[in-house]
Image (cartoon, rainbow, N blue to C red):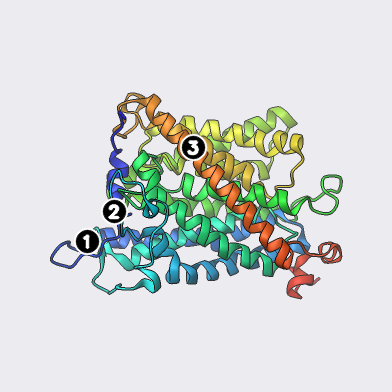
Amino acid sequence: MTLRKSAGLAALSSLFLPVMASAQEAALDSGDTAWMLTATALVLFMTIPGLALFYGGMVRAKNLLSVMMQCFAITGLISVLWALFGYSLAFDTTGMEAGVLNFSSFVGGLDKAFLSGLTTDSLVGTFPESVFITFQMTFAIITPALIAGAFAERMKFSSMLVFMTVWFLLVYAPIAHMVWSGDGALMWDWGVLDFAGGTVVHINAGIAGLVACLVLGKRKGYPGVAMTPHNLGYTLVGAAMLWVGWFGFNAGSAIAANGTAGMAMLVTQIATAAAALAWMAAEWLTHGKPSALGIASGVVAGLVAITPAAGTAGPMGALVIGLASGAICFYSATAVKRRFGYDDSLDAFGVHGVGGIVGAVLTGLFAAPALGGFGEVDSIATQLWVQIKGVLFTVIYTGVATFVILKVIERVMGLRVTEEEETIGLDLSLHNERSYNL
């Protein structure tokens, strides 16, 4: 295979191989540590309050608190699961060897369960392992929270908690391991480029969301009954928070305060701006008027698409990625959804799934130095095939696993609220509260 690891991916290897180092083996760098602490806080900010507001504004008023409650509950649930088992399943490298395919190529072991062996002196590269654990925890938190947008306004809260627990352990952790845990991991050995989570986070969440909305079925009255967003101001504020927080997501994945982080920040801004304009233009041409919801969605589409390419794409590559993702995600979230009739409530698949696929594939193109990228790619065609192979594997694995998990939960405890509860609204029927007491 005429492929070498990109410079960005090579830099990531020290981050995604969490081998504890003593002070004698590696020195803590206060600048890198400060940046990673900041990046970690920014990524958490993306879920609470960013995603909570972004999703919350798009649902009907009677379901605002239920969506926000899901974001907060998922944050608590995944934080605990990450400390108990998730970190170990994702980043334990026991039994892994470059080029050797075995069980450890698909999922980590339990040597790091309950954060065994962690001390204040444990380092990953040049900063504390505790910071790395928390940084990766925030990625693990937002991924299942994104899925909730696909089935908003109709899933039982208890079933949602069970689903997220099982899905996190059986889908998220293994995919993160296969992509990021280093030599011997399946997609790492393939050479898949995913700088900050295009595959691990966005395709993963988007495909799971599509399967979930299909299994649960449409909301009562959809599409005949108008289900307009109740507060687009919340959505715009949430989108702005996601935009700012995403610099922690992408630039933080450089694992240091260095030139790679700076370039990741620049390309993130360029791609996001381009996607916002592309979505706005496509909507303007199609519907005659640009909308606030459209430009907010375009922002997120651009953020999603540049995520896998943030460490390897140059500025002009980022511009093309942004323009492509904005236009393609617009048609996916509108024309394609109408054509096939599925009820992806808040376009988790249309934006995150499709945007993640667009970004993952174009990463293989714009990582090439000949096209202004910074990846060490000898053959664009080979890298494109590697990226497509990674996308296909993730789509199939996540889709099948999510379907099985949901069907088992449906049989054991049910998935949907009753028609009466859905009519009343989940705020009142599930949480005994109202968003607005007028």
- What residue appears at the point 41 percent right and 43 percent down from the top-left corner? 194
Quadrant occupied by the N terminus: top left
Q: Which mark is residue 256?
A: 2
**First-in-chain label (2 vs 3):** 2
**First-in-chain label (2 vs 1):** 1
Residue 101 sits above or below residue 45 on the image: above
Whole-percent x, y for residue 74 in the image = 57, 66
- What residue appears at the point 61 percent right and 45 percent down from the top-left corner? 296
Q: Callout 2: few (<14), some (14-19), or many (20+) C-alpha neighbours within 10 Å?
A: many
Real-space Cα distance between discs 2 and 3?
23 Å
For residue 284, side relative to residue 191 (left or right):
right
Instruction: Point out the residue furthest to the front here.
Output: 102
Q: Which mark is residue 359?
A: 3
When asked about the image quadrant of residue 103, the answer is bottom left
Residue 203 sits above or below residue 80 on the image: above
Real-space Cα distance between discs 2 and 1?
9 Å
Dots 2, 1 in contact, CB < 8 A: yes
Q: Which mark is residue 29?
A: 1
Q: Amino acid at mark 2?
A: Ala
**First-in-chain label (1 vs 3):** 1
